[in-house]
Amino acid sequence: MSYVAVIGLEVHLQLKTRTKIFSACPQDYHGAEPNTFTDPFTLGLPGTLPTLNREAVELAMMFGLGLNCDVSGFTQFHRKNYFYPDAPKNFQLSQYDRPIARDGYLDVTLESGEVSRIRIKRAHLEDDAGKLTHPTYAPYSLLDLNRAGSSLLEMVTEADLTGAEQARAFLESVQAIAQALGVSDATPEEGKMRCDVNLSLHRPGEPWGTKCEVKNLNSFRSVARAIEFESVRQARILDAGGRITQDTLGWDEGGQKTFVMRTKEGEADYRYFPEPDLPPLDITPEWIARVRSRMPELPAQKLARYLAAGVRKSDAQTLSLSVSLSRFYDQAAAEGAEPQKLANWLLGDVAGLLAAQERGITDSGLNPAHLASLVRLIDAGTISGRVAKELLPDVMAGLDPAALVQQRGLSVVTDTGAIDAAIDAAMTADPATVEKVRAGNAKAMNALFGPVMKAMGGQAKPEVVRERLQAKLGL
């Protein structure tokens, strides 16, 4: 009998605050020299006191509301005590039994179309730790405290996940919500979104097994691979009659495997106690209403809007999960282009060129109005799809497709005189095909259609060419 995986995720998001969560030290340290974004409180110097960042609180409230959480009532900070070089205060200011958000949920859609509801146990605010680097072969480590004290939101799910695909879909949805609300850049590659995986195995009908935690996974791919590897590792131990120990594991990206870091700590090891220098915070209904009124459209709301407009479900999901793509699409759609055809071009030919150039939609010179114009020119029969593809690189460089069509004389030819001349030339050049058609093989006409279109430079309207061919051939 196979095993069932029981998986819970802990997601850490660095909030987009201007200053750190408990001090006035600027937070945008990315790319800065090590240890240049610090202040007395961040360094844990004696006599310094925390001052709570209101912006961080309201971003956390907004994110909690986006995950259907309860954010009302009192919230409180605690000291989480541990001794490690990247924690200069020797404790972390976090939230223990009064998190800012709790009891939410997120519905995620898998590639199969199956919808899973993942419950959100809690989301709480805390200050981030510094960063240790370990130079290869060096007998020392380096400590950078630029990140220490940054505004961090940790979100914890219930153990509702059962596999890697589900975890990846959930993280993509969380990332999309965070980016849509503007609460976090949520970029794993920059360390602004990190994930821990808690996983255990059990046989159906039996109690849950002992869980292990895989720490600090910095890409969705790593999360999926870690879940797959750890499921196999634990199954092998159990099949051999072994016992799973509750360990904290690291992820070896090069070897694509987990490794033991330390024995898992329990809550008692952290000796939580209320932070004496920060009083409890009362989140009132009026405050919640003000925050909710500032919330932009969520991905689920975008998805419903795109589906109502007639966009194919897979395309609507892709658009709704990307802030930059959905913003561009909405601006182009406002210019009057047909919704699905616009999505086809944006997610097809445009996305292909952007990928080849290693650029995003915001880095290109493409104007939403110009892409909409290109789609309308095709719909109106002014240009063919082939001509549109030829124009696309120039349009993506910022040029107006309508002006290009006029300047280059690329409008579709509907002049029957010119088309008849091209048909006559094709029939003269291929009398055998003409005889086949007139003998009853109507499909053979396609052998004449191609040369006619080529002679017209691809600018003849296909419907007119077929109509004139049929007339000339007596069909």
Image (cartoon, helix red, strand yellow):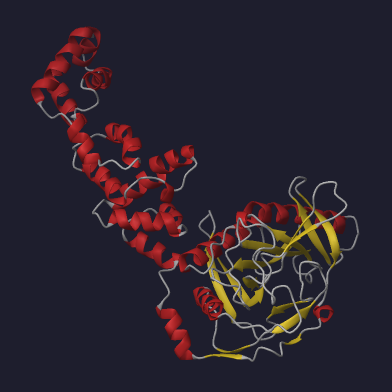
Residues 185 and 49: in front is 49
On screen, 221 above or below 29? above
Q: Picture coordinates of residue 129 (x, y %)?
A: 71, 68
On screen, 274 above or below 43? below
Q: Residue drawn at (31%, 59%), measured in percent from left and top?
A: 309
Q: Look at the image and tell me in which quarter the N terminus lies.
A: bottom right
Q: Picture coordinates of residue 359 (x, y %)?
A: 47, 44
Image quarter for residue 16? bottom right
Q: Is residue 178 visible?
A: yes
On screen, 203 above or below 462? below
Q: Residue drawn at (64%, 54%), measured in percent from left and top?
A: 219
* In the image: residue 263, left or right of residue 275: right
- As drawn, the residue found furthest toward the left would be 417
- As drawn, the residue found furthest toward the right would be 241
On screen, 112 above or below 210? above
Residues 130 and 373: in front is 130
Image quarter for residue 386? top left
Residues 368 and 169: in front is 368
Q: Is residue 202 visible?
A: no
Q: Picture coordinates of residue 394 (x, y %)?
A: 32, 36
Q: Picture coordinates of residue 475 (x, y %)?
A: 15, 22
Q: How many marks?
A: 0
* In the image: residue 167, left or right of residue 397: right
Q: Residue drawn at (29%, 36%), measured in percent from left and top?
A: 388
Image quarter for residue 71? bottom right
